[in-house]
Image: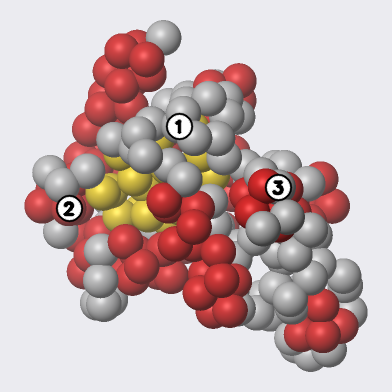
Amino acid sequence: MQSESIPLAQRITACRLCAYRFAATATAHAPRPVAWFAPSARILIAGQAPGARVHASGQPFTDASGDRLRDWLGVSEAEFYDLSRIAIVPMAFCFPGYDAKGADLPPPPLCAHTWRGQVMAALPHLRLILAVGGAAIRWHIGPGAMAAQVADWRSHAARGVWPLPHPSWRNTGWLRKNPWFESDLVPELRSTLRAMLKDDA
């Protein structure tokens, strides 16, 4: 009963379930969950997992991926980090670390199994979900290839879920091969977000 009286974000921040997992990675780091949400949020940015820079800063998307994502959305940093309106909830709250070759490890499923249902229940006012990256797309839309889900964005957006590729530099090649993303999807997304933020102002 005592744990239930502690705010959910605070309980997530204190989570150490994956300490043994992270200690075994090439980075050998300790958990540092980054929980960034409030019950009043109308927009959810569902990402993958924090990177090394976010692990250091303790604030989501404080890296080049965040710059690209904010450009896609057409929002300022102040708007992006406004907890009262935008929740940023990745599929795993901690930096997963790197493998022996220096590649990013995937988000540990244990994190979503433990926390995601509770977080979604704590966000009753959501009107729009941005599913950023394959893991988030699979959770919020269902199984399928990321590219195919993003290509079918209009049907998903009609239900309030926008599938987006991860804004990492690793997807620059995909973006070049799919110019419709920035010519068709991005303007529609910016317009939708701007109208929503204006309504909530």
Q: CA distance from mark 3 to mark 2?
A: 35 Å
Q: Is residue 172 visible?
A: no
Amino acid identity at mark 1: Ala
Q: Is residue 27 above or below residue 155?
A: below
Q: Residue at x 43, y 70 (%)?
A: 135
Q: Which residue occupies the foreground of this view, 95 or 173? A: 95
**N-term mark: 3 or 2:** 3
Query: Is 157 or 73 nearer to us in this picture?
Result: 157
Residue at 30% x, 55% y is 163
Q: Which residue is mark 1?
A: 41
Q: Taking 40 as reference, is 1 left or right?
A: right
The tag on residue 174 is none
Q: What is the CA distance from the residue labelled 3 to the residue labelled 1?
A: 20 Å
First along the sequence among labels 2 and 1: 1
Q: Note whether 57 is above or below 51 in the view shown.
A: above
Tell me how the rendering is colored: secondary structure
Residue appearing at x 25%, y 71% in the figure? 142
- The amino acid sitting under disc 2 is His
Q: What is the quadrant of residue 200 in the picture?
A: top left
Q: Choose mark 3 or mark 2, whichever is in front.
A: 3
**Which residue corresponds to mark 3?**
6
Which picture quadrant has residue 55? bottom right
Q: Tell me the element at label 3.
A: loop
The mark lying in front, picked from 2 and 1, is: 1
Which residue in the structure is indicated by mark 2? 156
Q: Residue furthest front?
A: 1
Q: Nearer the viewer, mark 3 or mark 1?
A: 3
Quarter of the image where the N terminus is located: bottom right
Q: Amino acid at mark 3?
A: Ile
Give the spatial CA distance, label 2 vs label 1.
20 Å
